[in-house]
Image (cartoon, rainbow, N blue to C red):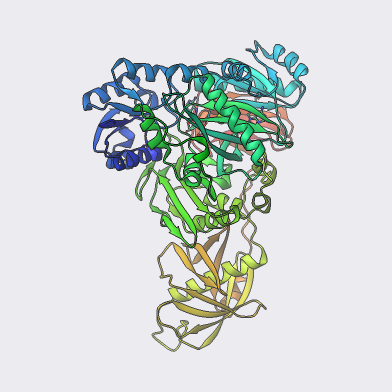
Amino acid sequence: MFKKILVANRGEIACRVIRTARRMGIGTVAIYSDADRNALHVELADETVAIGPPPAAESYLFIARIVEAARATGADAVHPGYGFLSENAGFARALAAAGIAFIGPPPEAIEAMGDKIASKMLAAKAGVATVPGHLGVVADEDAAVKIAAGIGYPVMVKASAGGGGKGMRVAFDDASVREGFRLARSEARSSFGDDRLFLEKFIEEPRHIEIQVLADAHGACIHLGERECSIQRRNQKVVEEAPSAFLDPKTRGAMGAEAVALARAVGYQSAGTVEFIVDRDRNFYFLEMNTRLQVEHPVTELVTGLDLVEEMIRIAAGEKLRLVQDEVRLEGWAVEARIYAEDPFREFLPSIGRLTRYRPPAEGKTDGATIRIDSGVVEGSEISLYYDPMIAKLCTHAQDRNAAIDAMADALDAFALDGIRHNIPFLGALMAHPRWREGRLSTAFIAEEFPGGFHGAEPEIAERTILAAVATSAELLAMRPPRSAKATALTPEAARSFVVALGREQVPVRATRLASDGAASFDLGVGDAPALRVETEWRPGEPTWRGSVDGERVVAQVGREGSALKVARRGASVIARLMTPRAAALAALMPEEKPPDTSKVLRCPMPGLVVSIAVVEGQKVAAGDTLAIVEAMKMENVLRAERSATVARILARPGDSLAVDAIILEFS
Ligand code: ADP
Ligand code: ADP
Ligand code: MG
């Protein structure tokens, strides 16, 4: 077995690999860029090596320096995590040349699967079903239009070197295949330095279901069942689960067998994932093979009880697989939600800054559900624009899908994060979404169910009552004990009337504080409803309110917003203000604030680089016309006109680096 492993990565995955290595009694080396000097993975490792400046190309992707770091520290193996150099055959070869083991597959397998065109050809040869399409490089836009006609719309334009959801566009007609070709090509060139594109049929109502495989150096190869990753935004996974609610044992067996056949055909060793796209009739087609540990591997670990990183380490050290196919047991249901530093209320723009609060729910097993958190941050960590915006992965495991989802909903409500924008409200709304709960998924789920983006869930009446009850109890607990007869605080058993303003809506509340020791207990008559019994141990200042409302367990986020209290749960939030009836009557007379008029300018929706401006001053545009293209986090974003207008003045130029909300152009 290895003595020391260098982890060539950062963030949550570096922390996760270090933990398993430590448990196995193996020493660990972390590498870090200048931006990560104080990062958690650096703190966790036994030894650390500074590797270079923040840009990944000069640090986490700098092969020579990383090999040198391994040599200098005497590491005998390197785990690459995911992303960065994990699918770089040159890195695996450089390590081999230095006599250091690469904890991953052989370089030939990485190469064979790294190119989407080549891997599709190989899969077809191994008898694996592939998406119908054109297996070759498409030369230009004209060729793309011709080939698309042969395949039949809709089609997908894809970069052969693509990954991470980048460099692909779906097209429904000749015009959009031309535009998609242009955008995918320039995205592929800037992200992968390789602009070869191909075309395949766009599978409608597709579900993304992938098979985890494990293969050793002695010819054994098994699969560990599937993960469904259909909840995606811009072809990037957001929520994953194992098993898939869509697969029957027969389809699972057939997909597993094809995945194993492909792994064998490329001489695979280590953990790997064969991704399939599955249509509504359960026909499945090979998409690509990821020759590395996958972000969402924890859900497989939760249902199989295996530690995939440990298996990878053992395989790289030459050990035989410790189980055969028949011994693989899938137990219960696991769900993973990716927590991203992005603003769901502003088209999911990346958000950077310091995590002034980071209080995840407790890990472990309670009430039949297990909570697991994979994270690379702590309170006070800095989220920078240099790297992936994922801050943590929250997983739950329970006996069935509903129980795992319930546990996830509660865990999200108990997750307190501040200082940056994050997608927890969106994930909370997702968990409560009836279609998700029913398991009627497709990769278009988010686009279909949140067509205009996410604007916060609209709480139903029952949910509003719960939010109002939480807000009232918290405000009552925050009041100071009475010092004079005029004070508003409640004394035990005395009922008082208040009004809770939820936004513009005013709801009368009649509150009685019940005598109790320990937890505070109230009877709250919200609106016309019968009084609710509210119990909580919450103390003023705590970000997470836990307690019960009429016997139902409730977890909610509470935080001050000026003189009001923001209460959030299940993706919905209310701004609540507790007032005396008299103050409420006066407040109702205040004029409503109008949001500012934004129709006169085009603002940059995210920090980014102007790639091109598509209009000139004086030009008339119609709704949907392209105005400008802005690149942010390696994606090219087309900014379109929202309505007919005339361009009066252009303030930005191609190449400009713009802050969020910077004005790109003005309309007259
Ligand atoms: P998964 O299928 O495990 O979710 P993704 O394809 O989303 O994996 O990629 C995992 C990570 O690796 C992400 O951080 C993604 O941005 C990064 N990544 C994937 N492919 C590439 C690539 N070719 N170049 C750079 N980063 C990549
Ligand atoms: P990447 O390397 O970026 O992960 P994939 O080929 O795995 O690229 O595709 C990523 C996602 O894009 C898939 O999970 C799926 O949602 C969507 N997708 C890819 N190809 C197709 C297709 N032919 N039809 C429908 N959706 C597709
Ligand atoms: Mg993929």
Q: Looking at the picture, how far across and down is residue 395, in whole percent?
A: 49, 49
Q: 638 or 43: which is nearer to us?
A: 43
Q: Would you identify the image quadrant in which residue 319 lies?
A: top left
Viewed as shown, does residue 54 lie left or right of 132? left
Q: Looking at the picture, how far across and down is residue 264, in whole percent?
A: 52, 22
- Give me the residue at 70% from left, 36% from top: 282
Q: 79 or 472: which is nearer to us?
A: 79
- Give me the residue at 64% from left, 80% from top: 530
Does residue 590 show up? no
Does residue 84 show up? yes
Q: 458 or 254: which is nearer to us?
A: 254
Q: Is residue 639 above or below residue 192?
A: below
Figure quadrant of the C terminus: top right
Figure quadrant of the N terminus: top left
Viewed as shown, does residue 146 lie left or right of 221? right
- Give me the residue at 40% from left, 66% from top: 541
Q: Looking at the picture, how far across and down is residue 269, in whole percent?
A: 44, 25
Q: Would you identify the image quadrant in which residue 446 lies?
A: top right
Q: Is residue 109 above or below residue 308?
A: above
Q: Looking at the picture, how far across and down is residue 409, in whole percent?
A: 55, 56
Q: Would you identify the image quadrant in which residue 491 lies?
A: bottom left
Viewed as shown, does residue 661 lie left or right of 48? right
Ligand 2 occupies quarter: top right
How many discs mark residues in the rendered view?
A: 0
Q: 596 or 211: which is nearer to us?
A: 211
